[in-house]
Structures are given as structure tokens and as C-alpha cells.
Amino acid sequence: MSGDHPIILYDGLCPVCNRLNLFVLRRDPIGRFQFAPLQGAFAHQVLARRQSLPPDLDTMYVLVAPGTPEERLLRRADGVHYVLRNLGGGWRFLASVGDLLPRCVCNAAYNAIARNRYRFGRHEACPVPRPEWRDRFVDMPQ
């Protein structure tokens, strides 16, 4: 796996996470981002390499520069800001505004959403993406 594509690690059963994926897919026509469910083998391998990080299903992660010496894992609001910044346009401005706020404030807002994410429903299994997007998902049936 090359470090060209950041990978969003998400809770595949969470409707909020799946809506975030759709949001990114629709605004990322060049395919900058890839996706992997936290329930999959790929995410477990990534998190196992960082033994201090538990595989929290209530946390979205972004794996930056995967498979390179510069590989790093962003979580919660830091991951959201990274995604918005890299989508460009007005989303970059929104990420800049978020960067001005203290990290604890951004993560508190993230945590409030994460605590309530299943109020919007819960998938029984990770939804299968549209055929035109399937190659951007790691650990998903093709």
C-alpha cells in the first residue's frame, strides 16, 4: 500500500460514519481518500501497530501516508480537520476555523456526536458501497 492515499478508518455499523464516507466520496472525485471499516482486518492491523491505542469503535481515524516511514494516525477532531482541509475549497476554510479552537473543545464536540451516533440507527453489517466506489474501500467485498 502506498502512502499516496490517506485511509479513513470508520465504524462500519454507524450511520453517521457512513454518511461521512458519502460526504467525502461525493466531494473527492479524484479519489484522494480510501476507506476501511474498524471491524475489518486492515484496521485491526493498523491499530495493533500502535499498542497504546485501543480499537475504539466510537473514534474515526485517518491513516496518513500508509505504509511509509511518515505514516501517522489522526483521531477524532484531528482526523475530521485533516479530511476537510484536504477536500479543499470552503471545506479547507472550515478546517482552519476548527484549528483555531482548542483541541479539547473540538474533541468534546466530536465525543458528543460519537456518544449519540446510534440514535440515528445502526447497520447490521457494513454497507457495501456503490460499484464505482468499491475500489476505494479496503476490507470490503468487491
Image: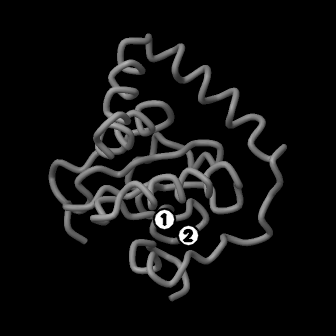
Q: Quadrant of residue 3?
A: bottom left
Work out whether 7 lies above or below 98: below
Q: Residue at x 35, y 58 (%)?
A: 28
Indicate left or right for 43 with 28 as reference. Answer: right
Residue at the disc numbered 2: 40
Work out whether 39 lies above or below 101: below
Amino acid on which the number 1 mark rests in the picture: Ala
Q: Which residue is drawn at 40% across and 80% down?
A: 135
Please provide percent x and percent y for residue 78. 41, 32
Query: Foreground: 118 or 48?
Result: 118
Indicate left or right for 141 with 3 as reference. Answer: right
Which numbered mark, 2 or 1, is in the foreground of this view?
A: 1
Amino acid on which the number 2 mark rests in the picture: Gly
Please provide percent x and percent y for residue 46. 41, 58
Indicate left or right for 100 with 128 as reference. Answer: left
Distance Cα–Cα, label 2 vs label 1:
7 Å
> Mark 2: which secondary structure?
loop
Please provide percent x and percent y for residue 88. 28, 41
Residue at the disc numbered 1: 36
Query: Foreground: 57 or 29?
Result: 29
Q: Residue at x 43, y 12 (%)?
A: 101
Tell me if label 2 and label 1 are in contact, CB under 8 Å.
yes
Looking at the picture, the colour scheme in use is one colour
> Mark 1: which secondary structure?
strand
Work out whether 129 lies above or below 90: below
Indicate left or right for 31 with 17 as reference. Answer: left
Query: Foreground: 107 or 87?
Result: 87
Please provide percent x and percent y for residue 6. 31, 55
Q: Which residue is drawn at 35% across and 51% down?
A: 63
